[in-house]
Image: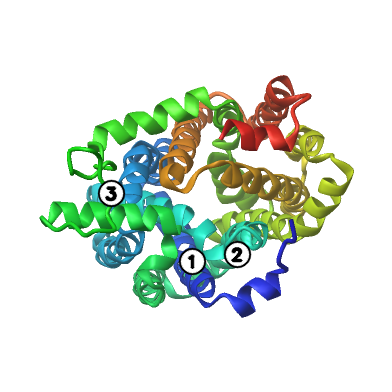
Amino acid sequence: MHSLTYWELIRGNRNFRNLLAGQFISELGNWFNFIAGLGLVRLVSDASPTAAGLFFVARLIPFAITSPFAGTFVDRFSRRQVMIWTDIFRVVIALSFLLVNDPGDLWIAYLATVLLHFFGAFFDGAKNAAAPNLAGKEGLLAATALLFSTRFLLMAIGSALGGWAAYAFGYKAAFIINAASFAVSAYTVWLIPEEATRDEETGERMRQLKRRRSGEQTENDATDKSGTLSNEQPSFMAELREGLVYTVKNHFAFTILIMNVIWATGGGSINVIFERLGGVYFAETEKWHPDVAVAMMWTATGFGLAFGMLIARRTSMYLDRKGRNYGFIGWALIVHGIMFAFGGLATTLWVFALIAFVSRALVGVEYAVQETMFQRSLPDYIRGRISTLDRGAELTMFGLSSYVSSELMYYITPQTLTVLSGLLSAMAGVVWFCRERGRHPAQVEETA
């Protein structure tokens, strides 16, 4: 299959271009919020590891718990409208951080963080389900790489700018920028036509069901022998169960789920590692400003992931020709984890940042290849449910790992945690080889 280049996709596909622009702007604001929110919690809690751990949990667990329901929701209703309204809600929520001034106000920061990521689960579910339709089969690899590379690029740029803005102008400026970014994102999504977010078959099915709910029916509607619509929509819970059953019974979907959860047992520690190493250890030993040091670590990580995503298209084409996609995914996960573990031996912030960049560049390529294979294997009518269930399970473990790691900081050093994080993440590659060795990409399509 011919795969569009990044430039061909962006130049020739206005709908995808609008989605990408909206994500670019809102992700920039999100990272301003993250650096400022974390710095604010550190400031008012006197650098409490538990307070930081609760902040990470507030970011991750609501998204994780909500994701399966959000996936079912966006498969039933307008993906475009879901994205627009969740952006509007988040404008107001982002501004509530301005009310946090002392330790007694920390609950506002936690609640606002929970709500931001609750609505974020619906936005991401709608975006991920719509993206393959906006990009088309030939543009899917480029679209996947662009969506994730720009997200990670904004991790780098947004965290760097967020750290600088927090240092230069204070936290309130970052929160205002975050709110404005959601408003701009809502506008760019509004420019996308409704019908572009679904394939033709699913779109027609939804139009028929909408007419049925309103008491209308046309000659073009599919009917059974009794004269009623043969594709009457199941209940919300029935569709939720359908997504769960599909994930467990489909070999490839279940492999991805297990592998991502295993990766998150180590990957979830990264929040605490960066907060303790950058905001405390390197801030004390090398006299870095805490917000700037943490931002530098996220900047290196973001640039690494973005770079990996951007070279993923050519890498995937090479792997396809050589038939080495499956081997690459497993070994990339193993090597990136071992490499990150060596970050625990870094003696300076710059050395750690370099190790983080290389490790994340490798996993960035791997994730683009893996995610493209995964999205191609999923039928449109159920894609929202499966992708958000997978993401939700991963982030549940990510959140639990973050909190456990924050509590471990009372007993072990952040350097030791870095080593454990890398080794646990590498186990995802072992799981991949155990479940997928000997399978061919064509078999993924057959099990879909």
Q: Report the residue marked by disc 3.
A: 106
**Residue 443 appears in which quarter of the rendering?**
top right
* Residue type (three-letter) at the residue carrying disc 3: Leu
Q: How far apart in space, not on screen, are marks 1 and 2 (Cα)? A: 8 Å
Q: Report the residue marked by disc 2.
A: 150
Mark closer to the chain start, 3 or 2 = 3
Residue 245 on image: x %, y %:
42, 25
Left or right of 447 in this view: 61: left
* Residue type (three-letter) at the residue carrying disc 1: Gln
Residue 260, compared with residue 36, is above or below; it is above
Residue depicted at 50% across the width and 60% down the height: 133
* Residue type (three-letter) at the residue carrying disc 2: Thr
Q: Residue furthest right?
A: 322
Image quadrant holding the C terminus, namely top right
Q: Are marks 1 and 2 in contact (CB under 8 Å)?
A: yes
Element carrying mark 1: helix
Q: Are marks 3 and 2 in contact (CB under 8 Å)?
A: no
Q: Nearer the viewer, mark 3 or mark 2?
A: 2
Q: How far apart in space, not on screen, are marks 3 and 1 (Cα)? A: 28 Å
Q: Report the residue marked by disc 1.
A: 23
Can residue 14 be spotted in the picture?
yes
Crowding at label 3, few (<14), some or many (≥20) Cα neighbours within 10 Å?
Answer: many
Mark closer to the chain start, 3 or 1 = 1
Q: Residue furthest left?
A: 215
Element carrying mark 3: helix
Q: Nearer the viewer, mark 3 or mark 1?
A: 1
Residue 285 on image: x %, y %:
67, 49
